[in-house]
Each structure stands twice: as structure tokens, then as C-alpha cells.
Amino acid sequence: MSHGEAPVGTPSQPVERTAEAPARATTHRHTLRLETVHARHTIAPGVVYDAWTFDSQVPGPTVRVTVGDTVDFTIVNRAIMPHSIDFHAAQIAPSRVYVNVMPNDSLQYQFIARVAGVFMYHCGTAPVATHIANGMYGALIVDPVRPRPPAKEFVLVQSEFYLGPKQGPDSVQSLDWQRMLDLAPDYVTFNGAANLYATHPLEVAVNQPVRFYVVNAGPNRVSAFHVVGAIFDRVYLDGSDAPLRGVQTFEVPVGGGMIFETHLVEEGIYPFVSHAFADATKGAVGMLKAGSPKGQMTH
Ligand SMILES: [Cu+2]
């Protein structure tokens, strides 16, 4: 079955990047160390990108803390050019800490996460569009002190890739600046790989509460997040504790994060997409598998 965008695989296949959210934090002080590394990243089968990363992965690691927690942060630059980091979850002077770190140097600072939500972090070195388009972003969840109700929780970071020609014996591709300026991505992905959770569906139970933490890293395309066959029970805008209710689709702005709660009322395969369908066609599609459905559907 499909929404016309991607073939559906079986969840038994190994997945290189899980969508499952990390567990809620149990301590109030977090030592977080991220290394900036240039590494190859597979966007789709046979499509290898010369990525700039946090900890050799795109997106970088998902971090989870609770409101009031202190993050003791260190960035270590293992790359051959300056990089930096900007935490949207922090309230801090950028001129002091969102500064370039030279190769083989490091920078340490602290912040207290005071606002609940799911927040982007990214490299802020100029040109920022290049550093984000090359893969330097991730998600940081800040939980409210009173835990959200139990749910099956997933983290999705949407982002785009703009590909230049294949180069070298390994056919590695790197950023096409003009395509990026023209907002013409080759791939739009959840968690860095096209159609990743279509070929590796996310499994939930019928009527189980499902919670998506969605960050849109961009650098350019707004996400119109939608689950086919479902309605969002609640949508939380950043730190808002007054959710929108009964929502079919909601935009996650570039550089923004949103929390979506839903449930699936019967067994089946439910695609989740950016309903900006050019982007779904370019890879921003995945599947939820509720129960053990048989048969196929088309749209
Ligand atoms: Cu960078």
C-alpha cells in the first residue's frame, strides 16, 4: 500500500536510525558533549553525501532533559573548519557562546532548560544555510516537570538535501548552493534518510496514544505534518501548555518544533507525511503500522 510515495517494507528489517524517543531524563544535571565531524551519510540507497555532522550522524543525537535541568555542554571540533552550536532550548547570549570553535579546539558552557517543548539545535557558523543543509542539526526535548501521559513516542527531524554531481570513485555528493538558494531539494527526509520509515514502519498498537516530537531543521521547507487516517488529538506549539485540539495538519516552521498526539482507531497502515506533497514525493513520508494489518490499500 502507499500514499503513492514510497514502498512499504517490514519492520523486521534493521533500521539505521530509530525514530523511538529516548527515555525521560532521570537526573537534573546533564553532561553533554558533541563532536563536529565531517562524515559520509547515506540519504537513500546509493546516495552518499559528504555531510557535516554532530557525532558523525545526521541528525545529531536526540537529547532529552526536564524543565529546570542544567546542561553542561562541550562542543569539540574534529573538523577542518570552524563550527559552532546554537540550542533553541537555551536562553543565553549568542555573542558569548554561539561562537565559532576552531578545528581541534573546544568550547564549554552551561544553560538551564526553562521552557518545555522540542527544540532544534544546529551549527550557527556562517553561512548557516550551508552548515544546516550539510547535516548539522538535531532535536532536544525538554519535558515538563509533570510528565506527559504515557504514549508511544517518536522523534522526527525533517530536513532537506540539495545535491551536486557525484564525484570521485565513491560517487559522493555534496551541497549544490544554487539549488539550496532556489529551494529545490533533491530529498526531503525524516531523520536524514528518504522514506526511511516507509521501508521500516513504526509499530504501534490500535488506540495506543502516539506522540511525535517533530523538529523541522529545513533549511528552507515548511513541514505540513499530517497522519493519513488520523486526526491529531492535541498539537503543542513549542512551550505552550494549551494545545490545539482536533487538528488534521499543522505546520512546523523551519527552525521550529511541535508535539503531536494522536491515536489510530483500527488495525492498518497509516502514512505520515509532509502534506506539501512535492516533499513527500522526495522522501518526507513514513508509515505507522497499527496492530497486524492484512491486505493493502491505495490512495
Ligand atoms: Cu558547522
Image: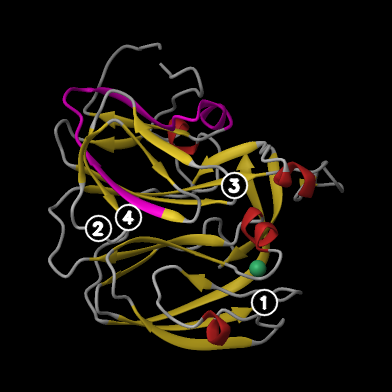
Q: Return the mark for residue 240.
A: 2
Q: Is residue 149 magenta?
A: no
Q: Return the disc, 2 or 3, that comes first in the chain's sequence.
A: 3
Q: Residues within 10 Å of mark 1 (few under 14, many from 20)?
A: many
- Distance between the Cα atoms at labels 4 and 3? 25 Å
Q: Where residue 154 appears, x then y in whole percent?
A: 32, 48
Q: Helix or strand or loop: what does disc 3 sit on?
A: loop
- Give the residue type at disc 3: Asn
- Distance between the Cα atoms at labels 4 and 2? 20 Å
In this rendering, position of residue 119 left or right of residue 169: left
Q: Which residue is mark 4?
A: 21
Depth check, mark 4 against mark 3: the one in front is: 3
In this rendering, position of residue 30 left or right of residue 178: left
Q: Return the disc, 1 or 3, that comes first in the chain's sequence.
A: 1
Q: Helix or strand or loop: what does disc 2 sit on?
A: loop
Q: Return the disc, 4 or 2, that comes first in the chain's sequence.
A: 4
Residue located 61% across and 63% down the image: 53
In this rendering, position of residue 254 left or right of residue 258: right
Q: Which residue is mark 1?
A: 78
Q: Return the disc, 1 or 4, that comes first in the chain's sequence.
A: 4
Q: Quadrant of residue 197?
A: top left
Q: Which residue is mark 3?
A: 220
Query: Which region is colored magenta?
Result: 257-282
User: Which quarter of the rendered picture does the N terminus lie within?
Assistant: top left
On screen, 83 above or below 131? below
Q: Is mark 4 within 8 Å of ligand 1?
A: no
